[in-house]
Amino acid sequence: MKKIVFASVMALASISLVAPMLHAQDTGGTIQIKDPAEFNSYQMATTQSDPKAKAAALEQFLTQYPQSVVKSAVLDMLIDTYQQLGDADKTLSAANRLLQLDGKNMKATFISVYIKKSQCAKTSDKQTCDDAATLANTGLQIQKPAGVSADDWTKQTGATYPLFDSTIALDDAVSKKDFKAAQAEYEAELKLYTDDQSKVAGLSDTLLLAQAYSQPGAAQDLVKAVWFYARVWDFAPANYKGQIEPKLEYYYKKYHGGLDGLDAIKTQAQASVFPPANLHIDPAKSPQEQIHDLIVSTPDLTTLALADKETILAFGSKEDADKLWGLLQGKQTPVPGIVTAATASQIKVAVTQDAKDAKIADFIVNLKEPLKDSEIPAVGFEFKTQPSAELDGTYDTYTQIPAADAKPATDTTPAVAATAQRAEIVLKDAFVQPVKKAPVHHAPVHKKAG
């Protein structure tokens, strides 16, 4: 599924630093540059109109006068200039240098966190995510400077604290796999927004909060997950609703057993970011009870969707799972899903929503003939059914995999996410059907009469 991204504009202007007035001669109450040559160099650098020329001149000034009394102001201007040029790496470098001079500088902290959080979201690199969270925690501890009014400080914290909480939550979820901590941080962030802000700037992290509540393990709370998915669905742009609704319906049906009552939850979620204390959704029967009812009520089990078959094999009693498997084993089936790993001889695919969320393959497909290097699908590729690229194989074996608890990261081992109970289904004699191109029809050629 295409990643959902909502635009969120942070009010950087509210935390911009104002460079002090500078003079070559003592004028009282201002920062004084005593050396005329240094002052002229400063004036030349700061008055450049071209951003590239200005950045180069400011860097030259810092190289020439590394101990200048205006070093902080120059670094502040350098941050703005690199931002104007769209150079994230150099913006981060300038912010880091400013933090070396002033470790409690709110602007430099904010910009460093913003860039590092973006890098964390893109790469999931543990060190990058941890660094971003450490800086964000520092930002939350910064006290109001003496020269800043209470109103201005309120504006600064209003612009920065949501990002800090969001960054810590992202580190908890991505690096530490601590979804309970992530839930707390995302909720702290959302409480900082007005109702209108929560529908725009806060909507992306409302989605991440829903995902944090839907993760398997002790922190899972599907009632809250449904609420936050419904809230996102309510206010998402129209072109994103189609991506959110399948997850909303999946987790509602997983908890409740059907879709009745979901429209009422959608309506309720329009009124508030957080669910009311008395929110109640009737739980469904146990997975084994639901599966048994499904088997009893389905005349031909082979007509079930592939994900439903996998669910029966994963959660059904041995009797019910074996009953289905007796009908499937040795039969050919398409395997629509997302590739989690692939070699020339084997493709691993996540078919169910749980498997996709956990990025774990529930189908292991062994190919009849090895693929050429150019034919091996990339991780993340999605097989569908013809005329799209289709993966077909023959049912061979299945194994029920019990649920596993999350394991926190240590100095020597990475964090391991909790996983739900699932089935691992092995297919043999598989092959890939490439995209079927539509036939080209040529208009008939009519000869002119002799």
Image (spheres, rainbow, N blue to C red):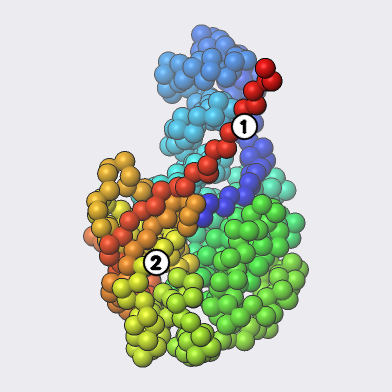
Instruction: Relative to 123, say whether 325 is above or below.
Output: below
The residue under label 2 is which amino acid type? Thr
The quadrant holding residue 166 is bottom right
Cα separation between marks 1 and 2: 40 Å
**Direction from residue 211 to residue 191 in the image, left or right:** right
Q: Nearer the viewer, residue 183 or 131?
A: 183
Q: Residue at x 52, y 65 (%)?
A: 211
Q: Which residue is mark 1?
A: 444
The disc placed on residue 357 is none
Name the image quarter holding the C terminus.
top right
**Cβ–Cβ below 8 Å for labels 1 and 2?**
no
Which type of secondary structure does the marked residue at label 2 adopt?
A: strand
Whether residue 319 can be seen here:
yes
Q: Residues within 10 Å of mark 2 (few under 14, many from 20)?
A: some
Q: Which residue is mark 2?
A: 333
The quadrant holding residue 422 is bottom left
Whether residue 381 can be seen here:
no
Which residue reaches farthest front? 450
The residue under label 1 is which amino acid type? Pro
Residue 407 is situated, as x and y percent measured from the top left of the image, at: 33, 70
**Direction from residue 375 to residue 200 in the image, left or right:** right
Q: Residue at x 65, y 26 (%)?
A: 446
Q: Nearer the viewer, residue 376 or 84?
A: 376
Residue 49 is situated, as x and y percent measured from the top left of the image, at: 62, 15
The quadrant holding residue 409 is bottom left
